[in-house]
């Protein structure tokens, strides 16, 4: 039995080393922000435009969602395709091979996954050879590959759990990818309630802990010196490691999202939860270095350079993600101060049947002009330069539509909207139009320039960072 314990301890030690080396490789390659990708909130054109204008990107990976948007309130010339805003392009899909579809999204294997699989197989082969010396070379590498596939399958199930719960809570899952570091799930749409955020976050680590228990249970029934026992023990430990590590209560880890949702539920303010979980994430980052170094110092032992290096790299990964989360939370707090009434331009309305001559009689220099249908719904906004460019002798027979920019269908922005509701409303209605109609619930009372929203977000977020 002591010999078995010695072998198991060796397996654990090497497995930890393998997991750390994979993480270090990820960090060295600069993929440190990939975890924030899951928390992408509101991945729609206006949110991308706002981020491009200076609002820090978020999420398990704040990937590049920024898009250029004109800061002018209105086009400077007649409404031609070249002078109008463009909707931001969709975020590009991870490069790789689509092998299946789950939760309505493609499952992608990236080229980097094969690099990780080969590297892990070579590393773990040493453990297999030492623990089962009677195995031939082919068998050793076969067992090592089996463990690597088991490890990646466990990480993939972690992501599958995130994907299905996210879909059940109203998100659109964009992709599940197997990558160098294991995998990631990308989905769009803002989380509306603390419970939604909690469930999406906790289900991944919970899946790994369930798998760890299952592997451990089956391990108890097998011959401890057999190859199956070695794989089962390694599967139990690796899933326990992934589950527990991800539950550490600090962003960008899943546990940080759990903490964020808890603070959100108690305070009613998600931004406070994000900032709190980000600060705890920084504490966790420092704690990892302390855990790796202080025990040795307290015993008067020499500090192992390898331990210092990998703990520092892991801490750097966590600190970077936590700092990004704090910035995102502060930006969200700043955005909460935005109000439609502070950004809107008052408007006069003219019927869709009006001519240019009719519209000129209704012009108010300080007001925008909105074209409405018989039901009072905004269908277009008049472009002042185009309106004034029509010759007087043609004004009575020129339809107003010739000088107007069509507006996308849908309800306008409520005049009482504030904070994130302003961004959501603009995102839902904005499209290619430079403005969004503002209503009091009955009639159009103004327009909200998309450029003004972008500038306001930039101003409040930069002011908050300062």
Image: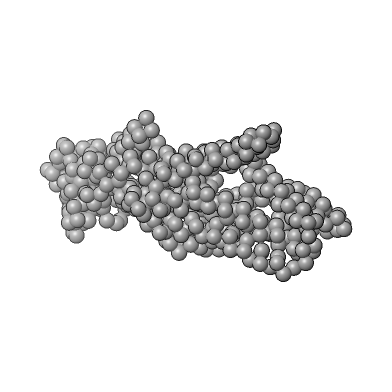
Q: Looking at the picture, tell me which residue is in the foreground, 81 or 99.
A: 99
Quarter holding residue 76? top left
Q: Looking at the picture, tell me which residue is in the foreground, 296 or 426.
A: 296
- x%, y% of residue 374? 18, 59
At x 43% / y 56%, what residue is drawn? 197
Q: Residue furthest bottom?
A: 221
Quarter holding residue 462? top left
308 versus 20 height, above or below? above
At x 83% / y 57%, what residue is drawn? 132
At x 65% / y 55%, what residue is drawn? 238
- x%, y% of residue 268? 32, 52
Q: Residue furthest front?
A: 299
Q: Left or right: where does residue 91 sit relative to residue 86? A: right
Q: Left or right: where does residue 182 sit relative to residue 423? A: right
* Quarter of the rendering occupied by the N terminus: bottom right
Q: How is the image coloured?
A: one colour
Residue 250 visible somewhere in the drawing: yes
Residue 58 visible somewhere in the drawing: no
212 versus 402 height, above or below? below
Q: Looking at the picture, tell me which residue is in the foreground, 250 or 462.
A: 250
At x 40% / y 39%, what residue is drawn? 55
420 versus 1 height, above or below? above
Q: Left or right: where does residue 347 sit relative to residue 138? A: left
* Quarter of the rendering occupied by the C terminus: top left
- x%, y% of residue 253? 52, 48
Count of all numbered marks drawn on residues in the image: 0
Q: Looking at the picture, tell me which residue is in the foreground, 194 or 418.
A: 194
- x%, y% of residue 18? 70, 47
Q: Residue furthest left?
A: 361
Q: Left or right: where does residue 265 sit relative to residue 24? A: left
């Amino acid at each position: 039995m002591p010999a078995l314990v010695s072998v198991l301890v060796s397996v654990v030690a090497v497995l930890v080393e393998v997991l750390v080396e994979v993480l270090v490789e990820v960090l060295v390659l600069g993929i440190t922000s990939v975890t924030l990708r899951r928390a992408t909130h509101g991945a729609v054109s206006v949110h991308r435009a706002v981020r491009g204008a200076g609002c820090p990107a978020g999420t398990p990976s704040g990937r590049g969602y920024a898009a250029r948007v004109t800061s002018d309130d209105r086009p400077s010339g007649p409404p031609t395709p070249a002078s109008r805003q463009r909707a931001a392009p969709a975020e590009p899909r991870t490069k790789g091979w689509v092998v299946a579809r789950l939760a309505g999204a493609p499952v992608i294997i990236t080229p980097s996954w094969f690099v990780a699989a080969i590297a892990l197989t070579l590393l773990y082969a040493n453990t297999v050879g030492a623990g089962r010396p009677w195995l031939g070379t082919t068998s050793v590498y076969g067992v090592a590959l089996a463990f690597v596939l088991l490890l990646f399958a466990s990480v993939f199930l972690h992501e599958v759990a995130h994907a299905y719960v996210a879909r059940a809570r109203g998100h659109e899952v964009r992709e599940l990818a197997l990558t160098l570091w294991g995998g990631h799930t990308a989905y769009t749409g803002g989380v509306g309630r603390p419970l939604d955020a909690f469930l999406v976050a906790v289900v991944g680590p919970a899946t790994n802990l369930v798998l760890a228990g299952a592997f451990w249970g089956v391990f108890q029934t097998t011959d401890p010196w057999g190859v199956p026992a070695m794989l089962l023990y390694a599967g139990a430990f690796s899933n326990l490691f992934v589950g527990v590590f991800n539950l550490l209560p600090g962003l960008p880890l899943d546990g940080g999202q759990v903490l964020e949702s808890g603070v959100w539920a108690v305070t009613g303010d998600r931004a406070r939860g994000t900032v709190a979980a980000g600060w705890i994430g920084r504490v966790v980052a420092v704690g990892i270095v302390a855990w790796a170094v202080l025990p040795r110092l307290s015993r008067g032992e020499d500090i192992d350079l390898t331990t210092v290096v990998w703990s520092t790299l892991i801490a750097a990964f966590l600190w970077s993600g936590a700092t990004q989360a704090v910035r995102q939370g502060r930006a969200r707090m700043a955005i909460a101060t935005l109000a439609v009434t502070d950004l809107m331009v008052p408007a006069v309305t003219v019927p869709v049947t009006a001519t240019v001559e009719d519209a000129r009689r209704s012009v108010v220099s300080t007001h925008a002009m909105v074209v409405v249908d018989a039901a009072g719904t905004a269908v277009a906004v008049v472009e002042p330069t185009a309106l004034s460019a029509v010759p007087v002798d043609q004004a009575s027979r020129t339809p107003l539509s010739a000088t107007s920019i069509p507006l996308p269908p849908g309800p306008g922005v409520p005049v009482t909207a504030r904070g994130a509701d302003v961004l959501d409303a603009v995102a839902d209605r904005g499209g290619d139009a430079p403005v969004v109609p503002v209503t009091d619930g009955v009639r159009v009372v103004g327009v909200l320039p998309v450029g003004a929203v972008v500038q306001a977000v930039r101003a409040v977020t930069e002011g908050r960072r300062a």
